[in-house]
């Protein structure tokens, strides 16, 4: 397993690190830029997105709209400060036809500032910052992943339906956490819920004990949190260790368990989360995708891989309509806007603000696996606050 | 805050502080006696945690992982000291920072190549995987065990530093290494042993913390920063200082989170600034040498 990943990595590195000047003879190749993290905390996410994109391209015979695909990858290191240079490298230096990425919302914000001035078609493959399809939305910018709102707003209703009207919120105090909490709060207060306490934990601190003691003393009906990655794993363990797991139902956006379920072990049992995907989703596209991804990489697919996979599939459909002519911007954008297909996550289409309209599922960890309890919100569409496009 | 909640938070703070002490004690020794600013100390913490994960996954026993892991850490310490650090004793701090920062990058890459980027959980040994009720919540036995181990180690270190000939040299080295050398003591050997001890302490802290924190890339860096704060507050080279410094930092962090949530992340540094204004060389720092 490690070997094949190493090999893939090596191949990716070779194809990207050597700057290739292409001349008229190979101008027919479709150059897709990948602005993704290949090192640091989010490296695993970057690799999964990349591998899933290559998998999808392979399923289309390595060609999109009749043009052979050439990948140009840059390690964005999840560093917003380096984002402008990296974006310029891809757009001005490598002259990519289509720009995709990133994972980190901070990088996405920096990227948005630049691509809004540029012509290049951009597809955001993970970062959930509201502004991407909100205040900063643009005709040539699409997102195939999610908005933070979509991961949290639907959860409010789940608590209210379970008659859990007093909740404590706890989150990492940076944009993703803040936006998740704002979305949850909007739904929860509207439905008659009361927020007993909001606990903002400085990012990336993982020292939760003091706050868990507070929660135990407050004894709310439920706790809704935003943590991701290693912080999520630590939080879930601490929550169970403090004896809270069996007393106060723990909820979160899906990132609380995505990719760290194994590390969390039995501590994660019973946690309910909302997300637009779940490993165990029972539909044909998901079964096929998961099997193919496993075969290609030796790893299990996840929500990040799905976004990469859908990015290329959406592009394939749209480019087919314009016969691979990326110069026909208006037509290409219109083609993407009307794209509909069956994603592993369920039916996929773009909203007027170019964010996916998608079902958000309620998931629960049972027996160490993520199971789908049902749909928390059908056709969840981000409110796209501040986006003037298409209105 | 009710009295019981206050007591609980006190327990939380002390427990956190004891673990911090274990990491910082090695750092303060190396910094104080060897005069080396060791940025790789956090990497040793991370390596310890990864060793705990790696060996316990293979053998099914965290005890065995600690038993094998600590000597492994000593060996790693010896290698690093002989191959790299020992060449820099005469150099200034900038060279040391460059070298040890290079080591951080090296260890991070090593971790990536060996164990990948995923987050890993480490299970607690079966005998200690229960929890005990504590007020409105519960307290896992492993946390209690970790705190207890830290206290034992602190007492052990105190005995060694205060009661043995070796400890005397360490104290002498911390206040004036050149003088110790002039008196005919093999400083190189002393330095080697101390560096290995520091590495092993950081590694052990990582192993003890692994079941609590999970094991993940970059876990050493956040610990390193706090450890430096502890060392500076406690006074460079003083183990006793590191002990009180660690408790102070942890209590400031714990109560900061509860009483002044908006100010929590700055609380630790505010305490550091206050201590340094009051005692510029730290709580128990050596007197200025005029060097």
Image (tube, rainbow, N blue to C red):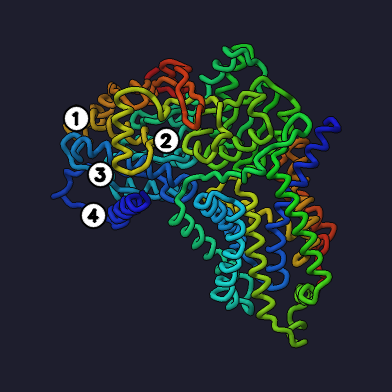
Asked if marks 1 and 3 fall on the same chain, the answer is yes
Residue A149 visible at all? no
* Label 2: element kind: loop
| Label 1 Cα neighbours within 10 Å, binned few <14 / some 14-19 / many ≥20 | some
CA distance for labels 2 and 3: 20 Å
CA distance for labels 4 and 1: 26 Å
Of circles 2 and 3, the one toward us is 2
Res B69 quadrant in image: bottom right
Q: What is the chain identity of the residue bearing mark 2?
A: A
Q: Which residue is mark 1?
A: A320
Q: What is the chain identity of the residue bearing mark 3?
A: A
Percent x, y for residue B161?
79, 69
Would residue A21 appear left or right of B221 to someone viewing this image?
A: left
Q: Which residue is mark 2?
A: A126
CA distance for labels 4 and 2: 29 Å
Res A111 quadrant in image: top left
Q: Earlier in the sequence, mark 2 or mark 3?
A: 3
Q: Which residue is mark 4?
A: A21
CA distance for labels 2 and 1: 24 Å
Q: What is the chain identity of the residue bearing mark 1?
A: A
Quick one: quadrant of the C terminus of chain A?
A: top left
Q: Earlier in the sequence, mark 1 or mark 3?
A: 3
Q: Which residue is mark 3?
A: A31
| Label 4 Cα neighbours within 10 Å, binned few <14 / some 14-19 / many ≥20 | few
Percent x, y for residue B233?
77, 58
Identity of the residue drawn at 23% across and 32% down: A316
Q: Earlier in the sequence, mark 4 or mark 2?
A: 4
* Label 3: element kind: strand
Residue B85 visible at all? yes
Q: Are marks 2 and 1 in contact (CB under 8 Å)?
A: no
Q: What is the chain identity of the residue bearing mark 4?
A: A
């Amino acid at each position: 397993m490690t070997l094949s990943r190493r090999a893939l990595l090596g191949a990716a590195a070779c194809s990207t690190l050597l700057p290739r000047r292409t001349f008229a003879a190979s101008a027919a190749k479709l150059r897709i830029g990948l602005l993704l993290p290949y090192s640091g905390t989010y490296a695993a996410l970057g690799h999964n997105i990349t591998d899933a994109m290559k998998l999808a391209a392979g399923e289309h015979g390595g060609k999109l709209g009749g043009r052979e695909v050439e990948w140009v990858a840059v390690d964005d290191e999840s560093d917003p400060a380096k984002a402008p240079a990296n974006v310029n490298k891809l757009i001005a230096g490598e002259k990519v036809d289509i720009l995709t990425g990133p994972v980190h919302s901070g990088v996405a914000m920096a990227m948005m500032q630049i691509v809004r001035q540029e012509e290049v078609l951009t597809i955001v493959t993970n970062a959930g910052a509201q502004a991407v399809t909100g205040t900063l939305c643009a005709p040539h910018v699409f997102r195939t992943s999610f908005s933070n709102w979509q991961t949290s707003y639907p959860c409010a209703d789940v608590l209210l339906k379970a008659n859990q009207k007093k909740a404590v919120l706890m989150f990492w105090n940076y944009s993703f956490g803040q936006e998740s909490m704002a979305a949850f709060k909007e739904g929860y207060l509207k439905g008659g819920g009361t927020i007993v306490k909001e606990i903002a934990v400085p990012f990336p601190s993982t020292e939760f004990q003091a706050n868990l003691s507070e929660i135990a003393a407050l004894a709310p009906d439920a706790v809704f949190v935003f943590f991701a990655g290693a912080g999520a794993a630590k939080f879930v363990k601490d929550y169970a260790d403090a004896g809270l797991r069996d007393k106060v139902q723990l909820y979160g956006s899906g990132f609380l368990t995505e990719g760290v379920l194994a590390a969390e072990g039995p501590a994660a049992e019973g946690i309910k989360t909302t997300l637009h995907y779940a490993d165990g989703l029972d539909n044909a596209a998901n079964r096929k995708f998961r099997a193919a991804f496993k075969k290609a990489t030796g790893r299990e697919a996840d929500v990040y891989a799905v976004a990469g996979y859908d990015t290329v599939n959406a592009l394939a459909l749209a480019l087919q309509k314009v016969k691979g002519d990326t110069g026909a911007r208006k037509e290409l954008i219109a083609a993407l806007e009307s794209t509909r297909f069956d994603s592993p996550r369920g039916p996929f289409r773009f909203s007027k603000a170019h964010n996916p309209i998608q079902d958000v599922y309620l998931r629960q960890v049972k027996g160490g696996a993520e199971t789908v309890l049902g749909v928390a919100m059908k056709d969840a569409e981000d409110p796209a606050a501040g986006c003037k496009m298409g209105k | 805050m009710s009295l019981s909640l206050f007591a609980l938070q006190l327990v939380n703070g002390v427990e956190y502080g004891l673990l911090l002490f274990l990491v910082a004690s090695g750092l303060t020794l190396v910094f104080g006696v060897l005069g080396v600013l060791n940025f790789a100390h956090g990497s040793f913490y991370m390596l310890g945690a990864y060793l705990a994960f790696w060996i316990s996954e293979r053998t099914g026993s965290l005890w065995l992982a600690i038993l094998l892991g600590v000597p492994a850490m000593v060996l790693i310490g010896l290698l690093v000291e002989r191959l790299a650090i020992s060449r820099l004793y005469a150099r200034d701090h900038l060279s040391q920072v460059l070298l040890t920062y290079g080591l951080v990058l090296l260890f991070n890459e090593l971790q990536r190549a060996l164990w990948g980027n995923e987050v890993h959980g480490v299970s607690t040994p079966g005998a200690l995987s229960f929890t005990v009720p504590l007020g409105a919540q519960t307290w896992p036995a492993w946390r209690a065990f970790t705190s207890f181990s830290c206290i034992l180690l602190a007492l052990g270190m105190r005995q060694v530093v205060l009661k043995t000939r070796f400890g005397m040299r360490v104290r002498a080295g911390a206040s004036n290494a050149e003088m110790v050398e002039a008196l005919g003591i093999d400083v190189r050997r002393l330095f080697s042993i101390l560096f290995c001890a520091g590495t092993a302490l950081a590694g052990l802290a990582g192993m003890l913390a692994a079941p609590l924190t999970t094991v993940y890339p970059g876990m050493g860096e956040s610990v390193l920063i706090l450890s430096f704060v502890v060392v500076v507050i406690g006074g460079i080279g003083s183990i006793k200082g590191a002990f009180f410094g660690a408790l102070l930092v942890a209590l400031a962090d714990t109560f900061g989170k509860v009483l002044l949530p908006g100010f929590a992340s700055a609380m630790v540094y505010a305490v550091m600034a206050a201590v340094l204004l009051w005692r510029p060389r730290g709580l128990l720092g050596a007197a200025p040498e005029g060097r």
